[in-house]
Image (cartoon, rainbow, N blue to C red):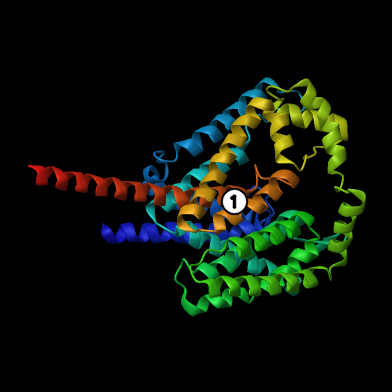
Amino acid sequence: MRKSKQIIEQAQRFALYLFFISINFEVWDPFNTNGFFSVSKLTGFIYLLTIIPNISNYSKTNIIKPFLLPIWFFFGLLTFVSIINVNNMHYDFFDLTIFQNIFLFWFLINHERKERLVLEKGMLSFALGSVALALLLFAGIGIEYEDGRVRIFGDNSNIIGLRMSISMAILILATAQNRLKLGKARFLLLLPIPIMLRLLAETGSRVAFISFALVFLTAVVLFKTKRILVKISVFSVGSIALIYSWIFMVKSETLVQRLLQSYNEGDLAGRDLIWQGLFPLIESNPILGVGKTGYDNFTKITFGSLSSPHNVILEVLCYTGIIGLIIYLYFLFRVFNKGYKNYKTEGLLLPLLLISPVFGMLFSGQILGIKIGWVIFAYIVGSSVFKQHQNQCISGLHEYNTASKDLAFHR
């Protein structure tokens, strides 16, 4: 019995790592199933199969209700508003992708509850998957260029760039803080950074470049250590590395041109036109929005095709109005606040750093249907909430023991 339990736990752990790696290939559909069985969906299904034997352990809600309740309320409101705005052209009122991602968020947090640091190892697995993605650029596998910007297996250039930004932060922090006790071998994790920078530059993603710069600067400034010489060394090495990264990145003509367009012309790659087109929809339905069905119908009529606003705040406002936006922002506040508190109490920097690329996805991309966003949310919550709860329990036990001793002494 004990051996079978260990085998199941090993399978769950392996499936989790495999899933984290596959997020880098989220839209790759090697079996040509029209997206029904992309690589990440397949590995996600495998992960689900492994946790079914003890699903009760993965569906616990104690301690994490403050994070689950607002996001489920948001999804319930989204579904309700979508139902009442069903039309002849668009009647898909149930967003299966968001539904699955909320369950993923839930299960991953509870996996951390079962096994401390499993999400930390999962994030490292994700970063190694990004290394594999960067190597494809040099191998010429799955590569195509659109307007001078690289795409791999048809994936969006911005999300590829953001993945590189996130993964480089993971590799650098795994080396600097060494929470996984990898020894000197951890310095090998820094070797792929140049090729990852190259891929980030090739995507021409402005939001990814800005996110990486902010992550790097924040890491150098906020890195905690009791030794002043280590702090000076980190600042010096970080400054040199940042200068090198800048020189390396500006060699990309596409990226430099796009950055200059943003600075000189305020160019937003057409996002501003979409945002202006959505304002009448928001003004006419400010309280509850029009749901996904109403939004799809409006964009089809206004723009001639289904169009993403490339801004999650606007997207949520269109879907669920001010009420839904308040609920969603409350969820984000709970998550981000947990990451900040974890840095203050534990010195864990990565959850705080990952907020920067998340903001990039929120204000210039997608996150509701993108798995890496939900994985980051789960990592931020899981890496802090159980540790803090454990500390509170230990503190309470200590106070109880002290009180018991005092009572015995007085007796």
Amino acid type shown at disc 1: Lys
Residue 330 placement: quadrant: top right
171 w.r.t. 325: above or below: below
- How packed is label 1: few (under 14 Cα within 10 Å), some, or many (20 or more)? many
In the displayed structure, would residue 395 be above or below residue 137?
above
Give residue 218's position: percent from left, percent from top.
64, 59
Q: Residue at x 56, y 48 (%)?
A: 377
Label 1, on which residue? 41
In the depicted view, which residue is nearer to us: 47 or 111? 111
Q: Can residue 210 be seen in this view?
A: yes
Q: Is residue 154 visible in the rendered structure shown here?
A: no
In the foreground, 268 or 319: 268
Residue found at the very far bottom of the displayed protein? 184
Could you tell whether 241 is left or right of 393 in the image? right
Residue in the picture at 63% in, 35% down: 95
Q: Give coordinates of residue 235: x percent, y percent.
A: 63, 70
Q: How many labels does the image show?
A: 1
Q: Quadrant of the N terminus?
A: bottom left
- Residue at x 59% of width, y 51% of height: 41
Q: Is mark 1 on a helix, strand or loop?
A: helix
Along the line of sight, which residue is nearer the eye, 27 or 387? 387
**Residue 311 in the image, given as x and y percentages of width and height:** 74, 41
Residue 217: x and y in percent read 67, 62
What is the quadrant of the C terminus in the image?
top left
